């Protein structure tokens, strides 16, 4: 590979990492479950796999009698990982660059062998471990696939960065809410009515605005996605690319206006989630301040 090819490959890797850190992994071309998603979840899945050696513990044994079965089970799990690596042509403890059907089958089916051999209630315990591992695998896929962890970090950064806008948001919402409070809650009838209501009612009442706001945000996602996908010129695109690995790359002789490619279904959902998170940050800020105002109001 020449110098230009190596530089292009390095730029692509840096850009893909940038997408992942922004919670937008599905904007990466040819983003795959085996090569990208489960590979990034591999440290967590390996930890779960090894910790499941504790499934050798049994109610029929106690004390030092648990030591030998535990280390035997741990040896089986670690030995299986080494065997799979050797069969794949890797070093014994090398981290796989792809997670295929063999690795998934090992994660799902090998840990249940331990209680099947060492427990009395073999079928129930083994079936429970299989079900648990399936849930862990699905959760790891969803969290990693849509970049929920980096998206959450991004949302927290947004939370810190939007404190400057908090005063403007609160001055719009708080006066109307205080008027509503004065008209509704400063009456004897309201307090008499609410005194007989249970905790479940208050939980539902607290969740209802949240669910309503979330539904409103979801309904606005198509419109917001259409807005963020349009650019007036390549100069606008270049300005937005500042602070990214693509900063400094000029548009050259590309014709205006830019034509945005249509997003695939998963990429559309991924961008939509980021938009919902960004809007939810503002809602969280305002709701927190309003809640504190109600607490101070008594």
Image (cartoon, helix red, strand yellow):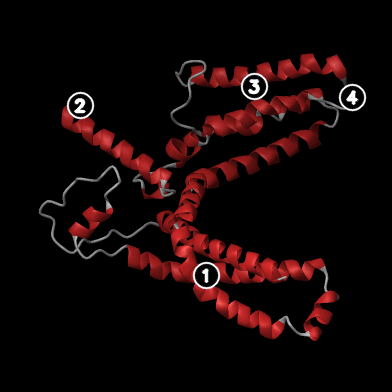
x 80%, y 85%: residue: 189
Report helix, strand or loop for mark 1: helix
- Pick the residue in front: 104 or 280: 280
Q: Is residue 19 left or right of residue 148?
A: left
Number of other residues with Cα within 10 Å of mark 1, as a class: few under 14, some 14 to 19, many 20 or more: some
- First-in-chain label (2 vs 4): 2
Q: Is residue 11 left or right of residue 76?
A: left
The answer to whether mark 3 and mark 4 are in CB contact below 8 A is no
- Pick the residue in front: 275 or 44: 275
Q: Quadrant of the C terminus?
A: bottom right
Q: Is residue 73 above or below residue 182?
A: above
Using the image, tell me which numbered label, if any, was put on residue 60.
Answer: 4
- First-in-chain label (4 vs 1): 4
Using the image, tell me which numbered label, if any, was put on residue 1.
Answer: 2
Report helix, strand or loop for mark 4: loop
The answer to whether mark 3 and mark 2 are in CB contact below 8 A is no
Real-space Cα separation, disc 4 to disc 1, in angstroms: 61 Å
Residue 106 visible in the displayed image: no
- First-in-chain label (3 vs 2): 2
* Circle 2 or circle 1, nearest the eye: 1
x 86%, y 28%: residue: 120
Q: Residue 11: percent from the left, percent from the top?
A: 26, 37
Q: Which residue is mark 3?
A: 77
Q: Is residue 136 above or below residue 43?
A: below
Residue 262 visible in the displayed image: yes
Using the image, tell me which numbered label, if any, was put on residue 109.
Answer: none
Real-space Cα separation, disc 1 to disc 3, in angstroms: 55 Å
* Circle 1 or circle 3, nearest the eye: 1
Number of other residues with Cα within 10 Å of mark 4, as a class: few under 14, some 14 to 19, many 20 or more: few
Report helix, strand or loop for mark 3: helix
- First-in-chain label (1 vs 3): 3
């Amino acid at each position: 590979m020449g110098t230009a090819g190596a530089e292009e490959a390095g730029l692509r890797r840096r850009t893909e990492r940038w997408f992942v850190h922004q919670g937008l992994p599905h904007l990466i071309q040819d983003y795959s479950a085996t090569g990208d998603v489960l590979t990034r979840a591999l440290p967590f899945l390996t930890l779960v796999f090894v910790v499941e050696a504790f499934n050798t513990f049994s109610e029929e044994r106690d004390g030092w009698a648990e030591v030998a079965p535990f280390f035997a089970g741990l040896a089986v799990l670690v030995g299986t990982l080494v065997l799979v690596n050797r069969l794949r042509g890797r070093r014994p403890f090398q981290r796989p660059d792809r997670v295929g059907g063999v690795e998934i089958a090992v994660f799902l089916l090998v840990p249940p062998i331990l209680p099947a051999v060492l427990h009395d209630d073999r079928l129930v315990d083994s079936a429970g471990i299989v079900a648990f591992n399936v849930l862990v695998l699905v959760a790891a896929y969803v969290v990693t696939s849509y970049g929920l962890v980096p998206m959450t970090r991004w949302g927290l950064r947004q939370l810190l960065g939007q404190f400057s806008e908090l005063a403007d948001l609160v001055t719009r919402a708080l006066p109307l809410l205080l008027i509503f409070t004065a008209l509704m809650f400063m009456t004897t009838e309201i307090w008499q009515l609410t005194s007989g209501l249970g905790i479940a009612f208050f939980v539902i009442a607290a969740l209802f605005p949240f669910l309503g706001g979330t539904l409103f945000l979801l309904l606005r996602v198509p419109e917001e996605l259409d807005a963020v996908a349009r650019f007036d010129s390549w100069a606008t695109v270049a300005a937005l690319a500042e602070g990214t690995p693509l900063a400094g790359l000029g548009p050259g002789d590309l014709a205006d206006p830019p034509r945005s490619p249509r997003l695939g279904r998963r990429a559309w959902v991924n961008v939509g989630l980021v938009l919902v998170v960004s809007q939810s940050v503002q809602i969280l800020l305002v709701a927190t301040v309003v809640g504190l105002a109600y607490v101070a109001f008594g």
